Amino acid sequence: MRPDHPFVSTPSAASNAAPRQNAWRLALRLLGRDWRGGELGLLLAALVLTVAAVTAVGFFTDSIATAIERQGGDLLAADLVIASSQPVAESLRAQAEQQGLVTAETLSFRSVVLAGEKTQLVQAKAISPSYPLRGRLRIQRALNGPSETMSTGPTPGSAWVEAPLLHALGLTIGDSLRLGEQPLRIDAIIAYEPDRGGGFAQFAPRVMIAAADLPGTGLITPASRVDYRLLLAGEPASLRAFRDWAGSHLTPDAELQSAQDARPELASASDRAARFLHLAALTTVLVAGAAVALASRRFVERQTDAVAVMRALGAPRGLLARLFAWRLLGLGLIASTLGCLLGYLGQQGLLLILGDWFGERLPPPSLRPLALGYGTGLIALAGFALPPLVQLARVPPLRVLRRDLGAPPASLALAIGAAVAALAALLLWLADDADLALRVLGGTLGAIAALAGLGTLMVYGARIAARRARGIWRLGLAGIGRRPAQSVMQLCGFGIGLLALLLLAVVRVDLLRDWQASLPEGAPNRFLINIQPGEVEPLREFFSAAGIDTSGLYPMVRGRLRAIGERVIDEETYDNPRAERLARREFNLSFASDLQSDNLLTAGSWWPNDQAPAQFSVEEGIAETLDIARGDIMHFWVAGKDISGPVTSLREVQWDSFNVNFFVIAPPAALSDQPATWVTSFYLPPGRDGWIPELLASFPSVTVIDIDALLTEVRGVIDQGIQAVEYVFGFTLLAGLLVMIAGIQASLGSRRAEQAVLRTLGAGRAPLLRAIMIEFTTLGLLAGLLASAFAALIGWLLATQVFDLPYGIDPWLWLVGVPGSALLIGIAGTLASWGPLVRPPLSALRAGN
């Protein structure tokens, strides 16, 4: 042995320092040798797929999130809105323009229009020429005529109105009306207005005019009650910068709104879309991480001989540890670069295929997914591959002469701890939702522990069955029991891969179908308000005669919140503008005997009967905004009378059901003697718009609110979210297949040596092949049983605990999962073992593993 060999220990400090300085160069040479020897193929493929999946998901969800946010802006006519009861400060407009944002203005107020001798209360809206910034206006040139899309509003001297105004005043297109002192010609009917809210406060028909006509009306004075809105739109970075700046520069009467703030229905739909997409990304990481772990084990087995040779040549353990660390770092950077490139190309292909979902080209993603990709690759390697590779440094040099000596067994605590830490870091980093990440992490650890425990029982059951079996069945089943640790590992790997495939093939379909069904085609698209108590029963009969069902008629009592416990509610109570606005306005209270089907109690209990004393059930979102807790005493001023009672329950409301819902509900005995109007919602089928004038003629005091356009937009968010999730889960499908390939490859080394010995003893290829088929088919059957059970459990947990959806177990989950997995793994394992089986036994015995 040469004294200058880099692995020879000498007393010279300089000779000891040289290997340390050149460790990274040697690591690169060894990495190249590993690649040429084919030892890195599976690990590199698993790692590239992991990073590609994460970056493709990241690029795509980044674009989708921006697109959904922009489409949400279509319901607000902007990306952000500053709403105020006073003219918006010029400094806010100047800052927005400095940030590169485009702006528009609207002014809304209540007034009365005149048409001859007739008058009608309306919601007037004056708009600047650039309105709307997001979305499009749709108008009709005749009643029940086709709609056309407009990018700007009415011209000066003209007005666009909603159809109920024509019905109320007996007007037609081309007639004139007067708003204040300004005469206006009716040019069109408003079919859709992006930022037309569906709230009960906007019960008067809309009249839209150009801002240039507003001074001529003479209606706006310093004492007028006007809703001023400054609309903003631009790139996400500019919007974020402006939002951060505006947080400390808004005047007390101003409020900054996004589409989610303004529309709880949209917020509910887009929140579910985001949670589905995050779940898809997390599932991909988990499954691909399992593939990395299994591939790392195979890589470690293949490195044992090389490490033994280096130890025999005098390589110290510290040098070997550094070599493996440098090799992993180089492998991680190469795989992460390839994965990021593939992820970006995959996302670009997706944009070409699916860009028209959003009516315009999807916005470009940010660079954040690149950091996610590199971070994921390095964290996955450190958590799954580094601990077993570090153990390789302890391979005894005697391994060169005795092939039966392997690396010392890895520390179970170190391996599990590193894997759990890597999973936790990746999930918390990728999820953007700590609650969802912790649930997925807990469920994953529980599933792996249960898979390992049940897999151990099944492996030992197969060992017992092998003792009673005969012939080729005994040989096949004995293969499972002969390597119990490896069989349990394979069973867990197969189980995770099959679990992912079953979640994709069956459970995913059920969850997305249930999500889509949460807003069915027959969801209410009209609200009817201002129903007088004496009209309730006649109105029910009127609907029944027309064959139209309602969601139920509900009483509505106006009340002002005066105090919560000892806190008196006034303009100084809250710093949050939304909380201040909610506290300042009158509440729409209701009373009910039973809890509505689309409400869920999250705290407390419902009152036992109609005669229960005054108490309140509060929607949990407004409870959080106004800092209301169960047990607080709420004081309302209703028709000159103080009505107070404790908060006995909190409710989660399914706002995207579009049924009538209330923030605050009381027992009937508390409010039934107060002046009330009634409200309902109903579904009006297409083509029956002509029934509305008949309804208004029979019940002239009621007001119809049309939310059909809003329903269409929310359904669009759901449909686009579902298609996005379908694509994202495709990466998980590839990861699941790779896990099963890695699981099969994990036992090929030891299996090759066993087959060589058996063939040397006279066993034929055909019986050995049948035994292998029995072994892998049995493993697939056991893995299918476990995966089907866990897929059903996870599907139920996701539906009920994460997405608030109903869920029923699909029998196809078991019919496909159990026999399908047995067939899939049986065939794949047999084909993978065919190559080593046809090789001469001597070459297999010389190769070792």
Image (cartoon, helix red, strand yellow):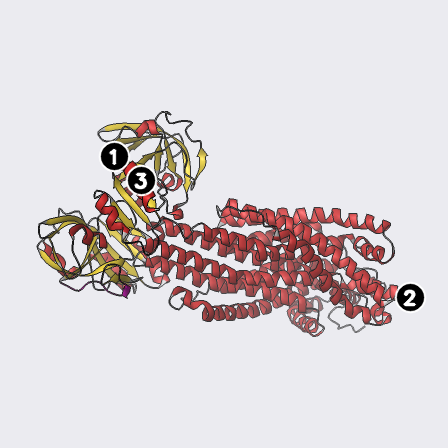
The numbered mark, 1 or 3, whose residue comes first in the sequence reads 1
Q: Which amino acid does label 1 sit on?
A: Gly
Q: Nearer the viewer, mark 1 or mark 3?
A: 3
- Element assignment for label 3: helix
Any part of residue 9 in sight = no
Label for residue 534?
1
Q: Residues within 10 Å of mark 1 (few under 14, many from 20)?
A: few
In the rendered image, residue 465, in percent from the top left (x then y), is placed at 82, 49
The span from disc 3 to disc 2 (Cα, nearest Å) is 89 Å
Residue range in magenta is: 145-156
Q: Do the residues labelled 2 and 1 touch (CB within 8 Å)?
A: no
Q: In the picture, residue 334 is in which quadrant?
A: bottom right
The span from disc 2 to disc 1 (Cα, nearest Å) is 97 Å
Q: Which amino acid does label 2 sit on?
A: Gly
Using residue 698 as the reference point, say whether residue 830 is left or right of it: right
Q: Nearer the viewer, mark 2 or mark 1?
A: 1
The residue wearing badge 3 is: 541
Q: Is residue 149 magenta?
A: yes
Using residue 388 as the reference point, say whether residue 652 is left or right of it: left
The numbered mark, 2 or 1, whose residue comes first in the sequence reads 1
